[in-house]
Image (cartoon, rainbow, N blue to C red):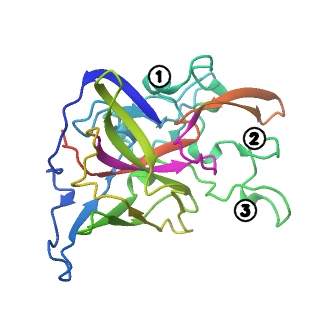
Amino acid sequence: MIIGKSKLLTAILCMASFGVVTAVLGEDYNNRGRQVFKIDALPTTGVNDLCGSPLFDFPFRFTFVGEYDPSPNATDALPLTQESCANNDLILATTTDPDFQAASVPEGIPLDASSLNKNLPLNRVPTIININSTRGQVPFRRDVPLSPVIVNGVSKENITLDDWFAAKATAILICRPNGTARLKTRFKNLVPNGIYTMWEIWRTTTDSGGVGLAAVPVGGVPNVFVANGRGFGRYARELSGCPMTNITPEGATMAFIDVVYHSDGGVTGGLPGLGGTVSTFIDENGAEYESTLPVGTISHTQLVFPMIVDEL
């Protein structure tokens, strides 16, 4: 997925200087001439977003999770703010970012998701239940006896802000003299049994010479891992270059790596979301409706590994 913005690109070639990157651990690692970087992840609520504010000196900011609004007529989650995020017990819910939608949805496709798919607690997001890709709610595993039916494998408890921010992760990036690299990551306190994907977020240039954003799978497709029942997970991939030192011929740099939680229990191949896809849903009363599948309704950025980017 590539998003453009009409602003000249200023390449940032220095490594992150705000303490989450422990600079080179060993330039002569095991006498093999390898550079090793240790990178600690930061909590996030979207791409370059933390409770409505940007994290980095980066030209884009998108929010992909909100605060559940219990009002009977609510049509969307409440926006997260620095003030509301002081409440660790607030329940996280689905939402969409209008700026992201405007920049990423193809012409002729409905710009936004149905209101029925917004303001849903993250543990109540519809999943595919039929061979024709129809989506709907399914019961929680502990609510039904063992039987050949689709059930929800995550916890019945709502995901709170405290749960979300409890996630931790560390990455080790090993850059070899031949130009290749290996990324190894470990996670804890993720959504138990949750499905996750890893995305390289690149600062690029558009055809018009402006600054753009590209999201591609880390190390290629598949870029998926599943947390265990205690929220632990691992992800490792070979990379064709070292993100800390490699710049493409077009001047693109890997700004950070996003860790995305898929609340619908599915993945989306080489794209972080399916905002241009219209799917059929069945609500809890059995009525059918249609909606697109944008980021924020089926997937949500939970952690970020800073690479070539500066903290604000």
Residue 116 in the image: state x and y as whole percent. Answer: 66, 28
Label 1: element kind: helix
**Are the residues at dot 2 and dot 3 in contact (C-beta closer than 8 Å)?**
no
- CA separation, marks 2 and 1? 24 Å
67 relative to 190, above or below: above
Residue 203 in the image: state x and y as whole percent. Answer: 30, 38
Give the camera-side residue of 117 and 293: 293
**What residue lies at 34% left-to-right and 23% top-to-bottom?**
5
Mark 1: which amino acid? Pro
Is-magenta flag for residue 113? Answer: no
* Of the image marks 3 and 1, the number of the one nearer the N terminus: 1
Give the side of residue 281 with respect to residue 254, left or right: right
**Numbered disc in front, either 2 or 1:** 1
Give the extent of the magenta segment: 252-274
- CA separation, marks 3 and 1? 37 Å
Using the image, tell me which numbered label, if any, was put on residue 136.
2
Count the marks: how many?
A: 3
**Are the residues at dot 2 and dot 1 in contact (C-beta closer than 8 Å)?**
no
Mark 3: which amino acid? Arg
* Of the image marks 2 and 1, the number of the one nearer the N terminus: 1
Mark 2: which amino acid? Gly
Disc 3 marks which residue? 142
Is-magenta flag for residue 260? Answer: yes
Using the image, tell me which numbered label, if any, was put on residue 98.
1
Quarter holding residue 28 = bottom left
98 relative to 163, above or below: above
Label 2: element kind: strand
**What residue lies at 75% left-to-right and 48% top-to-bottom?**
138
Q: Quadrant of the C terminus?
A: top left
**What residue lies at 60% left-to-right and 37% top-to-bottom?**
120
Residue 92 in the image: state x and y as whole percent. Answer: 50, 41
Q: Residue furthest top?
A: 108
